[in-house]
Amino acid sequence: MSEHQPVEGKILTLPFMFLGVLAAIGLYFLGVRFADGLGAVANINSGYPWGIWVVYDVVVGTALACGGYALAFVIYVFNKGKYHPLIRPAILASLFGYALGGFGAFFDMGRYWQFYNIAMPSNWNFNSVMLEVGLCVITYIFVLFIEFAPAVLERMGAKNMLRWLNKVLFFFIALGVLLPTMHQSSLGSLLIIMGAKVHPLWQSLQWQPLMALLTALTMGFSIVIFEASFAAVGFNRRPETPLLARLSKAIIALISVFLLVRVLELALNGKLGFAFAGDLAGNMFLLEMALFIFPLVVMLSRGNRDNGRLLLFAAVSLLFAGALYRFNAFLIAFNPGPGYSYFPSVPEIMVTVGIVAIEIMAYLVFVKKLPVLHSAEHA
């Protein structure tokens, strides 16, 4: 019997249909965007050319989709095979997250019909960080398709194709480690390019790529804990708390390094005073730091790590912390100059909610129809 099995069960459950309603609303406003242009649904402007679509779908969404990337480091680089039961659902979530992030970048473009130019080397600007991010994301989506293909081939019973794929899969696994490292660190480089428009609390010319990479890894490990915890509850499976508790040790190290680098950078450059200025940026920074410190305090205790509920709370706090770090840097504390303001419109928000709903619906269909979850996890 295969190590992985479909969950089976009904697809059209009440939660699934509720998600379908949210998806339909989002698709409606997306249709309006393509029919009448960006201005018909989005509040973006010359000062804020990136709204919630790019910041969430690309900047935050790709970090939320780093579960496969984080586990690849642990399993294939550090040879910790005991975490292998967690890898396939993590890759599936990464595939959906990155695919919808790429789609989000597409419908945020004013001239979306010229999207094909990114595939034409004659049009490339090799000094562009955005080019590197775009090419890496597109290539990584393809790599994730290959990495998830064994689940599809197992379902199809294509043993010969599966045997051949397993012989070359190591190459795509290596790419799956390299590409996110490149484009996640480059997202930090984008903040460097923005210069003084980025608030001093989030602007660091020396450490920006490292901090972007650290938040991506911490969010990747946290989303694995989140997925495994909800799969255990939602599909009546045995909790993976002992395995997740050991995985949380990597999170402790990552948070510690991130907080150390972050605070030292601010202190050495005389920027700590901004944190206590009492304005929006300062308060958001303090909230962000509290969200980072809470999971560190929880996970430092072995007893807390062995408590599935506390471990889940810590993971959720860390997901919010990483997301808020990126929202603060790219949008909330971003200052393009006088005369500009931005707050997402209802259609913008509903398109984002609709995309998330589609991602969750697709995940539910795949885990119920394909061998994604480890068979040993059944209750």
Image: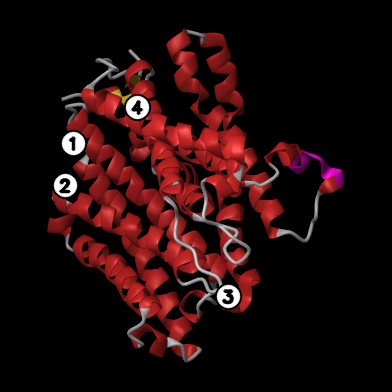
Near-viewer residue (88 or 98): 98
Residues marked 1 and 2 touching at CB (< 8 Å): yes
Please check the rendered image and state whether residue 118 is part of the magenta-colored stretch, yes or no: yes
C-alpha separation, residue under disc 4 versus residue under disc 2:
30 Å
Q: Which mark is drawn over residue 197?
A: 3
Q: Where is residue 238 in the image (x, y as percent from the top left)?
A: 17, 31
The stretch of residues the image draws in magenta is 117-122
C-alpha separation, residue under disc 3 versus residue under disc 4:
39 Å
N-terminal label among 3 and 2:
3
Q: Is residue 4 above or below residue 248?
A: above
Please check the rendered image and state whether residue 284 is part of the magenta-colored stretch, yes or no: no
Q: Which amino acid does label 2 sit on?
A: Gly
Q: Residue at x 23, y 57 (%)?
A: 314
Q: Which mark is drawn over residue 239?
A: 1
Q: Which mark is drawn over residue 308?
A: 2
Indicate the quadrant containing the N terminus: top left, top right, bottom left or bottom right. Answer: top left
Q: Nearer the viewer, mark 4 or mark 2?
A: 4
Q: Which amino acid does label 1 sit on?
A: Pro
Q: In this view, does 177 lie above or below 130?
A: above
- Residue annotated with mark 4: 20
Q: Which of marks 3 and 2 is in front?
A: 3
